[in-house]
Image: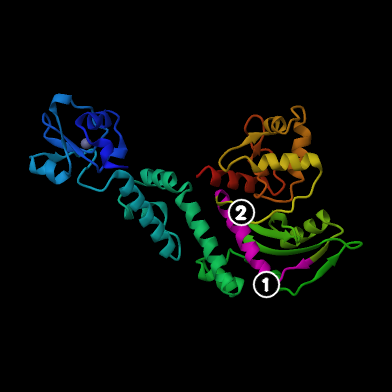
Amino acid sequence: MSSTAYASDAQRWAAVQQRDSGADGVFYYSVRSTGVYCRPSCAARPALRRNVAFHASREEAEQAGFRPCLRCKPDQPPLAERRAAAVAQACRLIDAAEQAPDLDALAAAVGMSRFHFHRIFKAQTGITPKAYAAARRGARVRAELAQGGSVTDAVYAAGYNSSGRFYAGAAGLLGMSPRAFRAGGSGAAIRFAIGACDLGAILVAATERGICAILLGDDPDALARDLQDRFPRAELLGAEADFEQTVARVVALVEAPEIGLDLPLDVRGTAFQQRVWQALREIPAGRTVSYAELAALVGAPKGARAVAGACAANALAVAIPCHRVVRNDGSLSGYRWGVERKQALLAREAGK
Ligand SMILES: [Zn+2]
């Protein structure tokens, strides 16, 4: 913003009347009747023009005998700057901590109420502090893996607690040598690995083209059988070490869906299913639609039942967010990977 934009008193008075935050720092105004001086954007009740004088700096206003307004705090950095600094400080605390500090601790550290801090953090970053911590943890796992460490080293280095919920019980599966399950004929080669996320066991599978399955459940063996049923003619290969990075990225998506997934998907289905799945991917985190609404979105307003079938056939949990579809009355209805997981995903995306 050029300071010549507020060169005349008339321009300055117009900026004050509009509470123009672009003028903040360019000039200050004092109010003779109250003895205070303000930033142009101050939300206080407008003063009468005849009581207002303009000052090039806050020193000038103070030398003229005015006190800083308690509302817009013209003697402190601008509000946006203070908020950004508080959020940056909270991010640094999360980055540095082995176990992410809870909301109360973060709010106290930056001198805000818990509610206010949560709102400011989300407004500034687009995500909740909890989602930020989960994303940072996922990023640290990926960084550790990129340096060539083992999955186990990486997840512990990234601060997963020693109860080992990450990959718990699946270490043997992850460490297994590549093993082919063949079910009739030759087909595409599908690499897969099974790990653990905060929703239980997770299977991630990929073809050359991209991720073709993300399955959630309680029993790792059942997930492997499910994969085999979905791709009966494919050659299923237990994952090699470099595939573990893909798993870490998918786990980060599941634990913080608003972060998104920057990996290609290999989506296989009928033309109708593909349309439904594409429409699902356009529903943002934090929103839900009904089966009827989704049917209308794909141009089949009477096809709610077929749409429900396409949702149930989805092989890419969370990446194709079929958990964002609820009954017409808003109740949860079923979920291929368990209604309690659907509930957990929706609560997380609602920032609860
Ligand atoms: Zn003020």
In this view of the protein, which residue sits in the foreground, 169 or 206? Answer: 206
Q: Are marks 2 and 1 in contact (CB under 8 Å)?
A: no
* Residue topped by disc 2: 261
Write down the quadrant of residue 171 in the picture. Answer: bottom right
How many labels sit on residues?
A: 2
Tell me which amino acid carries mark 2: Leu
Q: Which residue is mark 1?
A: 241
Q: Which mark is residue 90?
A: none
Q: Under tag 2, what secondary structure?
A: loop
* Res. 170 in view: no
Whole-percent x and y of residue 245?
63, 66
Tell me if 128 is positioned left or right of 145 in this view.
left
Question: Quick one: quadrant of the N terminus?
Answer: top left
Q: In the current view of this chain or complex, which residue is farthest to the right?
A: 185
Q: Quadrant of ligand 1?
A: top left
Q: Is mark 1 within 8 Å of ligand 1?
A: no
Residue span colored magenta: 237-258
Instruction: List x then y, in percent, for residue 305.
Output: 77, 33
Q: Residue at x 63, y 45 (%)?
A: 342
Q: Secondary structure at mark 1?
A: helix
Compared with 41, 204 (above or below) is below
Q: Does the magenta run of residues contain 243?
A: yes
For the residue marked with disc 1, what is the amino acid?
Ala
When asked about the image quadrant of residue 175, the answer is bottom right
